[in-house]
Amino acid sequence: MTSEHPAAEHRPLTTGAERRALVTGATAGIGAAFARRLAADGWHLVLVARDVARLDESAAELTGRYGRQVETIPADLSTDDGCARIERRLADGSPIDLLVNNAGISLNTPFLRSTVEDEARLLRLNVHAVMRLTLAALRPMTERRNGTVINVSSVAGFGAVMPGSTYSASKAWVTNFSESVGQSARPFGVRVMALCPGYTRTEFHDRAGINMSKTPEWMWLQADDVVDEALRDLRKGKMVSVPGWRYKLAVAGLRHAPRGLLHRVSRDTRGRIGREES
């Protein structure tokens, strides 16, 4: 069992005038909320996303409002070339003190109706890119004995609550991976944390074509609140952050409820393929 290192766990985020964070999926949702919060806290930024126009717009807004240096790198992290481009940035140039792996996708298609191409793209972005960028970031961080990685996972990763969807499986990997790697990085003064939000008001579901109109209002979180709680949990030394009391309760239920009960109460239309479609 890994020994505890309280000084490494509870030290504040990197201090100094040249703190720099790299955020993927940085032009919308939780990624954009991280960028705003970090810029307001005095961090310089490296923003990564596919859309060049939105990257430039975000950079101009953050620089104008907060006076921070904002570098942009357009990259599709579901491709080897896109990952390699960010790996090079993590290895070279100004050191990255904080990596936020936020980019990810879901599919509005049950597995039995999906394609190899779509499922492979989900795995490349949600799993493969997270692994590659985390490894690229941790090497210089452990050499410096300072740094932080936040991998954005999901409450969905704690149980198979979306029948037919492989999104929850990919996020289960992210959470488990982050906890495991976090234990090995801790003795070097480096922290790795999985951020596991529930439903959050972003463009995420719209982009996937998932109709969320019947989701009760009380279940939604705001992206800025998710980031606030994530940073609080990071300062407390947590390896897994679940924002919002309602989702903390949900995770407790997912971890301890009988699997049969979870299967009976699961309600996700992506997996409901009727007999007439079989």
Image: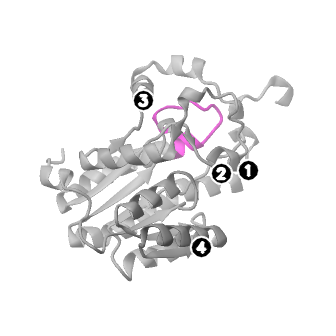
Mark 1 or mark 3: name the one nearer the start of the chain: 1
On residue 115, the disc is 1
Q: Amino acid at mark 4?
A: Asp
Magenta stretch contains residue 158:
yes
What residue is shown at x 61% (from left), y 53% (from top)?
122
Q: CA distance from mark 4 to mark 2?
A: 30 Å
Q: Is residue 253 left or right of residue 162?
A: left
Q: Relative to residue 262, is residue 4 depicted above or below?
A: below
Mark 4 or mark 3: name the one nearer the start of the chain: 4
Q: Please give the range of residues in magenta.
A: 157-170
- Please, what secondary structure does the residue beneath circle 4 have? helix
Q: Relative to residue 180, is residue 93 depicted above or below?
A: below
Front residue of 210 and 124: 210
Residue 241, quarter of the rendered image = top left
Q: Amino acid at mark 1?
A: Thr
- Please, what secondary structure does the residue beneath circle 1 have? loop
Q: Is residue 234 left or right of residue 245?
A: left
